[in-house]
Amino acid sequence: MTPTLTTRDLDLRHLWHGNAQHLGLENRPPLEMVAADGVWIEDSEGRRYLDAMAGLWCVNVGYGRREIVDAVAAQMTRMPYYPLTQSHTPGAQLAARVAEMLPGELSRIFFTNSGSEAVETALKIARQSQRKRFPGQNRYKIIARHRGYHGFTLGAVACTGQAARKAAFEPVLPGVLHVAPPDAYRCNFCKTQPGCSLACADEFDRVIRMEGPETVAAVILEPVIGGGGVFPAPGGYLESIRATCTRHGVLMIVDEVITGFGRTGKLFGSDHAGIKPDIMTMAKGLTSGYLPLGATAVTPEVFQAFQGGDSEKFVQVSTFGGHPASCAAGLANLDILMRERLWENAASVGPYLMDRLRAIDSRWIGEIRGRGLMMGIELVADRATREPLAEPEVIARMMAIRRAGVLVGRNNDTLSGHGNILTISPPLILTEAQAGIISDAVAGALR
Ligand SMILES: Cc1ncc(COP(=O)(O)O)c(C=O)c1O
């Protein structure tokens, strides 16, 4: 009789994990997760962890929300699937609900399956609409930032400013340029000045002028760079880029895949600056990860470019984008977010956690930064020179935090030698007591 294969056996034989070297994986197998509730996740050996990454920056309302499960089951029973080539109630209702919440004029929603697809959609919308708006010009270029992350597909990865994520696949989408991120800790512009001059925001203006505005379709940026190492936009930065875009007829795509739906202490990251994006991308917190769903929102002005003859429609169809069950999950998820006003909890427990982390006395902590419940801890080998802590050391610290029962993330595959930032992005239901568990685990591993 053949022995029954365990999940680990099957995994090691057949599963292909992203961003993982499989050679020798049997000696460092991935955690096998089996159950979850609130901020807690449990592995197959019965160990419980406080999930301080909310999965992958996404389980905003926390695990175990029965009302999302029930809404999905009801939708699946009524009608498990139909594409948005026609219409269905959860799709239309969710589009309306999201439109109500979005900043500025954003009011028209295209649903996809993921954040990467939401970004691809935004890039295509930007190019096509700019050709209509500026006949005779060829506005195809996109300006993004080093260290930013926008997804894994060839357009989104081209916008991603992390060399290690694209080197093996180049050439990726041509026409994408990158400028410096707002990284106050390692800023080249400000190191000779007393404070932040927003010179990194001015770079957008300079590059657009140098390239010729008539060649630039859009800029794309995250209000707080997430996976690249958590770099919040400083005060005045997004406002300045908004003004630059308007001046040059360039569309501003704000990628709120992580920052959307409460993570930073307001409903959207853009809300901190009061800016009005032309296009916004979303995913993650839209369903809190209960089912896959991404979305791209545009203003009436952008949408207007697609009104007219057949050649002016947006030629893109997605079999599963806007799946009725995902939209039902999104509606139930947003009910919880709004009813419990979870962004307010992020705005209060976030700073509490930040204070606790900043109180840790460790020679390895170079900088702790973030916004709401989204934080990065930059680890250094030497606080005076700011030399990044070597990756094996960073991983060892992360594992020590894990042994203390808390899961944090790390900015891997960003920039060679700079995989030194631990990331924290827990469910937005986090209590102060649970924030204490995170900071105690970090303190224990970094002291
Ligand atoms: C800002 C941002 N944009 C896009 C993406 C891509 O989303 P997905 O992994 O759902 O394709 C991510 C994923 O982490 C992200 O953080």
Image (cartoon, rainbow, N blue to C red):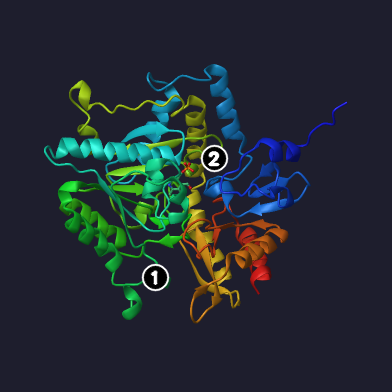
Instruction: Please identify the quadrant where the C terminus is shown.
Output: bottom right
Viewer-side residue, 245 vs 66: 245
Asked if 35 appears above or below 208 in the picture, the reply is above
Q: Quadrant of residue 436?
A: bottom right
**Whole-number angstrom distance, CA of label 1 to CA of label 2:** 32 Å
Q: Nearer the viewer, residue 441 or 66?
A: 441
The residue at 12%/37% (across/down) is: 135
> Is the residue 305 above or below the residue 263 in the image?
above
Q: Nearer the viewer, residue 400 or 382?
A: 382
Q: Residue at x 60, y 49 (%)?
A: 20
Q: Is residue 322 left or right of residue 248?
A: right
Q: Position of residue 69 (x, y in %)?
A: 60, 31
Mark 2: secondary structure: loop
Q: Is 228 above or below relative to 443?
A: above
Q: Is residue 128 left or right of residue 356?
A: left
Residue 264: give x, y in percent of width and height. 45, 55
Mark 2 highlights which residue?
A: 289
Which residue is labeled 1 in the image? 184
Q: With respect to residue 172, does 234 lie above or below?
A: below
Q: Amino acid at mark 2?
A: Gly
The reply to whether the residue tagged 2 has its Cβ within 8 angstroms of ligand 1 is: no
Q: Residue 156 occupies which quadrant of the picture?
A: top left
The answer to whether residue 192 shows anywhere in this view is yes
Locate residue 120 relative to residue 435 in the image: left or right. Answer: left
Point out residue 329 in the picture as x, y percentages from the top left corner: 52, 32
Q: Residue at x 62, y 43 (%)?
A: 63
Q: Is residue 265 visible?
A: no
- 1 vs 2, front mark: 1
Q: Position of residue 347 (x, y in %)?
A: 48, 58
Residue type marked 1: Ala
Mark 1 C-beta closer than 8 Å to ligand 1? no
